[in-house]
Image (cartoon, rainbow, N blue to C red):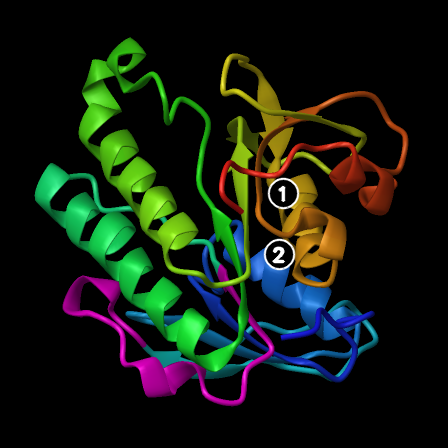
């Protein structure tokens, strides 16, 4: 599938699109003229910025129960921004097997995938209280990479509710820090239509106040092995 030049007039599915980060992704897409469907166990409609009239459609999807490949038909891309269950079994069902099912569907349909993951994927032992969730997320990442779908994996640092700001992108999962949900949403939306972001995994941190040049930021990243 050819990456679009803009999200305007594209059609996108946002899994977790009424959550704390996903709703910001949804709003940004709507503001930029996209057609958006919010998916989740209890999805809620999300509107664009003040002064706009665009509102997302909704559809019930429970990743713990799998994902029907036909649910991606007609979509240009999908953003997975799901808050995981707190138990290890639930996290494995959603963040590993659920993500794998979406990845398989995207490979079939040609939809672009942006997965919002987290830092510490390669060092789960540093946070034993959440190691099960981190491990499940890591398995979901690997399933996406192996799926042959066009993808980008965004690994946010510790999330805050602050405004979008400058960012620092890293690779190798060695850092720590914070990042605003608004900046994560901006990165996810930019990655949906950037060829320079394809086949890449990166960590994202707050860094100053400069508005990111997403094209330059993505171009500076190394592609994943085998991507």
Q: Position of residue 111 (x, y in %)?
A: 53, 74
Which labelled disc corresponds to residue 56?
none
Callout 2: SS: helix
Residue 8, compared with residue 137, is above or below; it is below
Q: Which residue is at the front of the view, 134 or 85?
A: 134
Q: Is residue 164 visible?
A: no
Q: Is residue 68 magenta?
A: yes
Give the number of the mark in front: 2 or 1: 1
Q: Residue at x 20, y 19 (%)?
A: 129
Position of residue 15 relative to residue 135, above or below, is below
Name the foreground residue: 137 vs 27.
Answer: 137
* Residue depicted at 27% across the width and 41% down the height: 139
Instruction: Establish if 95 lies above or below 170.
Output: below
Q: Which residue is mark 2?
A: 24
- The residue beneath circle 1 is 184
Within 10 Å of disc 2 (Cα), the crowding (few <14, some 14-19, many 20+) is many
Residue displayed at 28% across by 15% down: 127
User: Does the residue at mark 2 contact the one at mark 1 (Cβ under 8 Å)?
Assistant: yes
Q: Quadrant of the N terminus?
A: bottom right
Residue range in magenta is: 61-79
In percent of width and height, residue 99 lies at 32, 57
Of residues 14 and 154, which is closer to you in this image? Answer: 154
Residue that protrudes farthest toward the front in the picture? 226
State the SS at label 1.
Answer: helix
Q: CA distance from mark 2 to mark 1?
A: 9 Å
Q: Is residue 216 above or below residue 125?
A: below
Q: Is residue 187 magenta?
A: no
Q: Position of residue 77 (x, y in %)?
A: 57, 71
């Amino acid at each position: 599938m050819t990456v679009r030049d803009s999200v305007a007039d594209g059609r996108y599915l946002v899994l977790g699109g009424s959550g704390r980060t996903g709703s910001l992704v949804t709003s940004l897409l709507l503001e930029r003229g996209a057609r958006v469907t919010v998916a989740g166990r209890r999805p809620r409609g999300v509107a664009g910025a003040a002064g706009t009239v665009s509102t997302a459609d909704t559809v019930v999807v429970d990743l713990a129960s799998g994902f029907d490949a036909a649910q991606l038909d007609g979509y240009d891309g999908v953003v997975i921004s799901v808050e995981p269950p707190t138990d290890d079994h639930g996290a494995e069902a959603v963040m590993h097997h659920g993500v794998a099912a979406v990845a398989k569907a995207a490979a079939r349909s040609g939809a672009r995938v942006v997965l919002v993951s987290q830092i510490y994927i390669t060092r789960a032992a540093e946070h034993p209280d959440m190691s099960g969730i981190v491990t499940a997320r890591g398995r979901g990442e690997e399933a996406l990479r192996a799926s042959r779908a066009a993808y980008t994996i965004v690994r946010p640092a510790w999330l805050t509710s602050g405004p979008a700001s400058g960012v620092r992108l890293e690779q190798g999962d060695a850092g720590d820090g914070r990042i605003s949900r608004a900046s994560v949403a901006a990165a996810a939306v930019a990655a949906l239509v950037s060829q320079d972001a394809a086949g890449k995994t990166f960590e994202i941190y707050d860094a100053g106040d400069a508005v990111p040049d997403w094209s330059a930021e993505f171009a500076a990243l190394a592609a994943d092995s085998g991507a």
